[in-house]
Amino acid sequence: MITASSLLLGLLAAAPSPSSAELERAEPERAAPSSPFHGRGPSPAAEPVPVPPPPSPRPAGRAHASLSEGFGVDSVDGRFGLSLGLLASLRYGVDVVDREPTHGFAVRIARTMLQGHLFGNRLQFQLQPEFAGTVRLLDLNATIDLHPAFALLVGQYRPWFTRGFPTNLPLQLSLDRGSVLDAFRVDRDIGVTVLGRPFDGRLEYYLGVLDGEGLDRDAPRNPQPLVTARVVGAPLGAMGYSYTTVANADHDLPFRFAVAANAATNEVDRVDTVLDVMTGQLREVPLPSLRTITVGGDVALQGWRVQAMGEGFWRRSQPDGEAAQSAWGAYGQASIVAVRKRLELATRVGVMRLESDPAARMPIEPGINLYLAGDHAKLQLRYRCELWVDTGGCGTHGAHLQGQLWF
């Protein structure tokens, strides 16, 4: 009798035994020895970790040379800068005085200007000598700008008494500032002026105390302090001190205007030089001291393609112990752009009577301005007639062509 146990033993004995190859395939793979770098690439000992290159050095500043900026250097952040510029003009003129014509070329201006700024525009300085004719120092000053409503101007500069005189020559409408302004302006002097342009320039004020000597410091005038004051209102927006804004614009400008009042007063001793008939030598004779009070006002406007400005003055001169004398004058100028950024038609008309004049005279000056590179290179042609009001004739007249370079 076959039992269950004998049947099971028989089946086991009949089953084939696995080969060695089958045993190898059936045996599970053994894991590689544990390592901290397993699966992480080669060991650092075999390949060094790369070190990134050092950052490129940041440039300390930039140099520039152009018509608009001159030659100069600036820091990268713009907080510090220094520039050197040049202003030069060559004029050919034909003038007739008392029916006697004269003509010729003349270098009217040859000036260099060194300008700089520190800490942004907190501190600005300027050095400007003149080399045409007699070499002399025109400007040497610094402006400490603490706030739009408060700044301090110190040194030798053009006093803030008019609109026309503080406006730079390259930004004038004509070849020069005109005979009326030259007769009433306060000359460059050494002093200090407190100034401000708050409300985005809609208000300006200037209060200056100056030495009173002017540029001519050889005369022993022993002056009292020269005091100047100026206040400007521009309700529609700030008006810059430039008469070529419209000419250099590539679009019609919005209408703006500014109105200003000015005053200046000082007292100086005077001397005269006479010939001593006993010794044959020149000697100085003291004259009575002279107290001068000058007041004035100006208005400027611009809009579309038109720009205009006018100024008026009245001056009272009081010699010590003598009768007072008065003088007055006014002028107006206007321009219209014929070809944008290229051609401009301009005119200036004035009238004045000075203390020494027997009658009033009226300078009339029409002209044409051709802009080659904005204010930096231009040609200006002007005719000038100095009309005597009482006789109606031109005491002097002439035509002038001037080329100007400014960078």
Image (tube, rainbow, N blue to C red):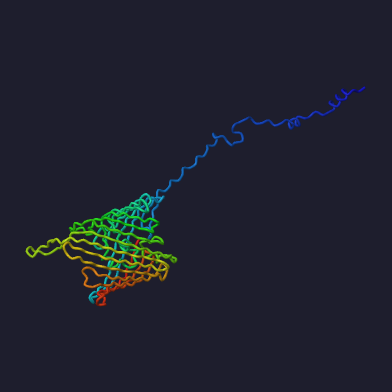
Query: From this viewpoint, which residue is outermost toward the left?
Result: 278
Quarter assignment of residue 108: bottom left
Is 203 or 383 nearer to us in this picture? 203
What x and y, as percent, mark residue 394?
A: 26, 76
Residue 407 visible in this rendered orientation of the protein: no
Is 34 or 361 nearer to us in this picture? 361
Name the quadrant of the C terminus: bottom left
What x and y, as percent, mark residue 238?
A: 39, 60
Position above or below: 154 against 376: above
- Residue 82 horizontal side relative to residue 357, left or right: right
Position above or below: 1 against 278: above
> So how many labels did they put on this image?
0
Quarter assignment of residue 46: top right
Residue 308 visible in this rendered orientation of the protein: yes
Query: From this viewpoint, which residue is outermost toward the right?
Result: 1
Position above or below: 62 against 374: above
- Residue 392 horizontal side relative to residue 147, left or right: left
Position above or below: 197 against 182: above
Is 281 or 239 nearer to us in this picture? 239
Name the quadrant of the N terminus: top right
Quarter assignment of residue 164: bottom left
Is 358 or 244 nearer to us in this picture? 358
What x and y, as percent, mark residue 17?
A: 80, 28
What x and y, as percent, mark residue 279?
A: 7, 63
